[in-house]
Image: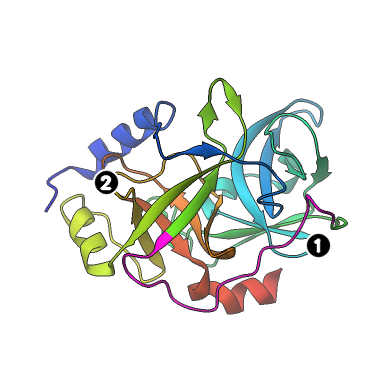
Amino acid sequence: MRVIAFLALCLVAVAAVPSSRSLDRRLVTIEQYPSTALILMTWDGIHMRFHCGGTIINNRAILTAGHCMYYRPSQEFRVRIGSSFANTGGQVIPVGAIALYPGFNDAFFHWDISIVLTPGFTYSNTVRPAPIAGFNLADNLTVLATGWADIEGDRQINEEQLVTVSQDACIDYYDDAHAQIKDDVVCTKRPDQDGGYCGGFGAGIFQSGILVAVHSNCYAPLPSLAIRVSHHTAWIQANA
């Protein structure tokens, strides 16, 4: 059991994100993960900054975390696809609408998933949809988390190997933090420590090239939280 107050966890998480680094994290390219997308924020339609990661699921929709899109109008967002870098390259396209999962809770990030809808785009060797898992994740399964963590002063796509944690163990980790773990949540951690991945909010987690989860949140030094894609397949298909 981990005896940590939830508020303290949040503070630790915020402080830990910028400096979170791992020897297991490595830079990759868009050709390796052509379904990878970035959610950008803009305040004037010209200047943009990195906001969250995302995953292409068809020729107009990006799957990301609900908290990435909550309380913001669609016109404040753009999507960059087809680039290995957060700030340059690829295509930048407008956002037409946002589908937030019903019941999303911004206090505890319950049902933390959303779909970003664009006018559409064309596939290429650097822009491809990810196949979506129709199966539940097994325990102690090796997965690859993608993200855009700041490495060497630049934001480039990176990946890190993680291991899934059983639902019972996940609940135990967070029990004393007063964080309720829903059925759609999967905990992931590094193979050699309890801590998870803090560089991929909204980005995809893959197993054998299949999108199995969306990175939700990170409370260092506990395992990170992700949303099981298989739990929401029907909603995704209906809204994408």
Q: Residue furthest top?
A: 153
User: Counting residues from the N terminus, which is met first, the one under dot 1 or under dot 2?
Assistant: 1
Can residue 36 be seen from the camera position used here?
A: yes
At label 1, the amino acid type is: Asn
* SS for dot 2: loop
Report, in whole angstroms, how far the alpha carbon at label 1 lies from the one at label 2: 38 Å
Image quadrant in which you'd find residue 121: bottom right
Which stretch is magenta?
124-142
Q: Is residue 136 depicted above or below 153 in this figure?
A: below
Residue 218 in picture, x, y percent from top left: 37, 44
Secondary structure mainly formed by the magenta segment: loop
The question of residue 46 being in magenta is answered with no
Indicate how the structure is coloured in the image.
rainbow
The question of residue 131 being in magenta is answered with yes
Q: Nearer the viewer, residue 92 or 97?
A: 92
* Disc 1: which residue: 59
Q: Quadrant of the N terminus?
A: bottom left
Q: Residue at x 37, y 63 (%)?
A: 186
Q: Residue at x 35, y 28 (%)?
A: 15
Mark number for residue 143? none
